[in-house]
Image (tube, rainbow, N blue to C red):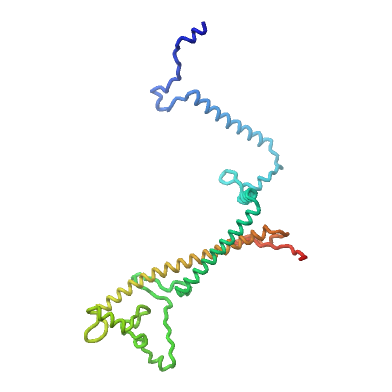
């Protein structure tokens, strides 16, 4: 009879869904959902119970080396950097670490040398005097700092009767310039190709030409000042990077010395970004 009972099709009973008047409460929890939630709850309770038992049976004098190699950061335990470094050295080998350190030292020295050569070239090209000699005022005019042009003559009489126009072979209107001061031959050549540049009566630039030349000079001065400021900023950044590279080189050299053989002791700890100082025990040469 049991076989006939199994042959007859029976109604499949299913878990009901959430009633309509309780739909605002979300999905109705099924048995499989309850099993997952209950399993997670009991797992957490077991962990809490285990921690309470360990805390009750704790030995105040117990010690593990992991206590020295770890720290609590934002409520979580983590290994300190020194412990991580020792683990990496143990993984890749001490010899491989020495090769990597020597390569790092060579790279730092190469970059330092490149920056030093670049700074020397920039100092020679910019005539470096300690700061940017040219600044821009509020009226968009160039203001020069410490800009002098010294001319040496043979006698005192020549110095007293010195004429800037004759010395630079230019016109009086352009004698006060420190740069872009063309000679008379160049002005005559330009005047022959440019109508209205010179007055017909006197071979001097007209007011229109002087105004145009002044505007051009102001524009060129702005461009020159901007380029010079950028160059000085780059040189200052490279100089700071040279100091950082030298500091990194000192740290790498110290690490290389510390890993070498021989008894040593620290006589000065690391401070202000500088590496520690070690003193080695004297060893008799054979």
The quadrant in which residue 180 appears is bottom left
Q: Position of residue 207 (x, y in %)?
A: 25, 79
Q: Is residue 81 something that shows in the picture?
A: yes
- Name the one closer to the observer, 261 or 29: 261
The answer to whether 72 is drawn above or below residue 167 in the figure is above
Q: Position of residue 36 (x, y in %)?
A: 52, 28
The quadrant in which residue 176 appears is bottom left
Q: Position of 142 compared to 79: left or right? A: left
The answer to whether 95 is drawn above or below residue 205 in the figure is above
Q: Residue at x 26, y 85 (%)?
A: 203
Q: Is residue 272 something that shows in the picture?
A: no
Q: Position of residue 35 (x, y in %)?
A: 53, 25
The answer to whether 105 is drawn above or below residue 74 in the figure is below
Q: Residue at x 42, y 78 (%)?
A: 147
- Name the one closer to the observer, 167 or 131: 167
Q: Quadrant of the C terminus?
A: bottom right
Q: Residue at x 42, y 67 (%)?
A: 230
């Amino acid at each position: 009879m049991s076989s006939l009972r199994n042959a007859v099709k029976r109604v499949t009973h299913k878990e009901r869904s959430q009633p309509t008047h309780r739909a605002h409460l979300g999905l109705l929890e099924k048995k499989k959902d309850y099993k997952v939630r209950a399993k997670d709850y009991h797992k957490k309770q077991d962990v809490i119970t285990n921690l309470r038992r360990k805390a009750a049976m704790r030995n105040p004098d117990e010690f593990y080396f992991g206590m020295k190699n770890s720290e609590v950061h934002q409520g979580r335990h983590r290994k300190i950097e020194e412990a991580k470094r020792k683990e990496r050295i143990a993984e890749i080998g001490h010899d491989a670490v020495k090769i990597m350190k020597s390569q790092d030292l060579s790279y730092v020295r190469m970059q330092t040398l490149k920056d030093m050569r670049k700074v020397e070239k920039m100092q020679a090209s910019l005539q470096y005097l300690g700061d940017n000699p040219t600044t821009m005022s509020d009226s968009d005019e160039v203001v020069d700092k410490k800009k002098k042009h010294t001319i040496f003559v043979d006698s005192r009489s020549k110095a007293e009767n010195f004429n800037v126009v004759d010395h630079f072979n230019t016109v009086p209107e352009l004698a006060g310039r420190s740069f872009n001061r063309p000679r008379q031959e160049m002005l005559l050549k330009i005047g022959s190709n440019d109508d209205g540049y010179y007055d017909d009566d006197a071979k001097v630039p007209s007011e229109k030409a002087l105004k145009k030349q002044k505007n051009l000079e102001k524009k060129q001065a702005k461009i020159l000042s901007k380029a010079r400021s950028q160059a000085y900023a780059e040189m200052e950044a490279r100089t700071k990077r040279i100091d950082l590279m030298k500091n990194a080189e000192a740290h790498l050299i110290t690490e290389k010395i510390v890993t070498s053989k021989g008894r040593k002791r620290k006589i000065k700890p690391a401070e202000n970004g500088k590496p520690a100082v070690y003193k080695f025990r004297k060893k008799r040469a054979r």
